[in-house]
Amino acid sequence: MDDLFERKYTRRVYVLAWLLFVAIAIVFNFTGIAILKSIYGIVSACILGLLLFKAQNKRRIVGAGVFFFLYLFIIDTLSVLFFTIFSGKTIEMVRSNVVLLFVCGLGNQIMLLCFYKPIVALMKKHKFDIITFQQNLFLIILALFEAALLIYIMSFIDKTSSGVMLTMMITGFLGLDTYLIYLFETISQKYELEREIDLKKQQEEMQNSYYHSIETQYDHSRRLIHDIKNHMQTLEEIYSEGSNIEAKQYAKTILESMDTFSGRFKCKNRVLTIIINDKILKCDDQSIRIDTQVEDLNFDFIDPFDMTTIFSNLLDNAIEACSKVSIERREIDLKIYKFNEFITISVRNYYDGKLVWDKDSLVSTKGGKHMGLGLKNVKSAVEKYEGTMQRKSDGEHFEVKILMSPESRTDI
């Protein structure tokens, strides 16, 4: 586990955990019930991994724990079986003789050490995190079933046979387990690819929508510029007639029209400018105040599709939540600033209702999981750049905060 994951505590904690693990294992060993020892082995491997180590996805730790148990169980069984095959002894003779068991134990440790490095390399390469919780649970049950079946069969043949039959069964189980893990990973990769394709389609639709919005604004601006000569002549005539108040009101109307089409937000990043101006117009339609405290930072390290995913989903969720509260509480705070070497993005808004969580996903209170899907897409986009996303609520405000470093992009 230490070679696969990052430690949470100091070395002393791990020594104490190992001693506790061994002490409990001895207690289970005294019971003489083999299946109980197997259950303890697989459960303790998973629990200790989750408690003592940290990983980006806990499924990796559970998957590694199951794989680790199968590795120990198979090596332990094979060490006894190989000895019975080469010595001509029966399994019962080996199990009842302390000296023979000691020799098997030495063989067991030698085999564990010989295969340790290849096993760790394989586990590092294997993508346990894309295997679902249900698939991991199935592998745990399968591992326990295989252990129970082998123990049961062993009780019938250990008096009359060497370990040839059991060795063949162990080899078959090992092949089956390896194939199932490979199959689950392939299925999970297929679903992951389908999800990415759907996400790309969603991003393309949003981009096309924004480009269409810009074209519409450009057409309106061109028409306004075309008419500006007429407007100036009218304004001059109003002034010449001495109607200063009416002239000021007419000038104000012209300026407001120009502001509407020119956009109220500007920054270096063209895509971010498009998105925020589009959301500002949506906020105007629903009487939502949006406060944009945005530093003009360089977002070139983020792909335009990911920019769309992050900011569109966050602001759309905030607009949806604000539209359900009273007008005086319709307010969104968007902050983008640099703190040390990190770019911080914060979207904070009022909300009315109960937040419903489904594991890691926020579920809309009006049913379905479309809000949760949006946040999942945001999290997926942020993690491409080794960023983190935090969500918190105080019963009145809901806030999503993102931290990303421009230096830590992960190329996919």
Image: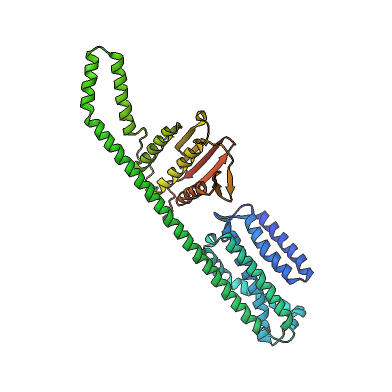
Q: Is residue 211 left or right of residue 198?
A: left
Asked if one can make out residue 303 in the rendered structure from this viewpoint, the answer is no
Question: Does 110 appear above or below 332?
Answer: below
Quarter residue 298 falls in: top left
Q: Residue at x 52, y 49 (%)?
A: 369
Farthest residue, direction top: 242
Quarter residue 238 falls in: top left
Q: Position of residue 181 (x, y in %)?
A: 55, 68
Relative to the observer, which residue lies in front, 31 or 370? 370
Quarter residue 143 falls in: bottom right
Q: Position of residue 53 (x, y in %)?
A: 61, 55
Asked if one can make out residue 184 in the rendered structure from this viewpoint, the answer is yes
The quarter in which the N terminus is drawn is bottom right
Q: Residue at x 66, y 85 (%)?
A: 85
Q: Residue at x 51, y 65 (%)?
A: 185
Q: Is residue 119 left or right of residue 201?
A: right
Q: Position of residue 77 (x, y in %)?
A: 66, 76
Relative to the observer, which residue lies in front, 338 or 366? 366
Q: Residue at x 56, y 75 (%)?
A: 175
The quarter in which the C terminus is drawn is bottom left
Relative to the observer, which residue lies in front, 334 or 353? 353
Image coloring type = rainbow
Question: Does 56 appear above or below 157?
Answer: above
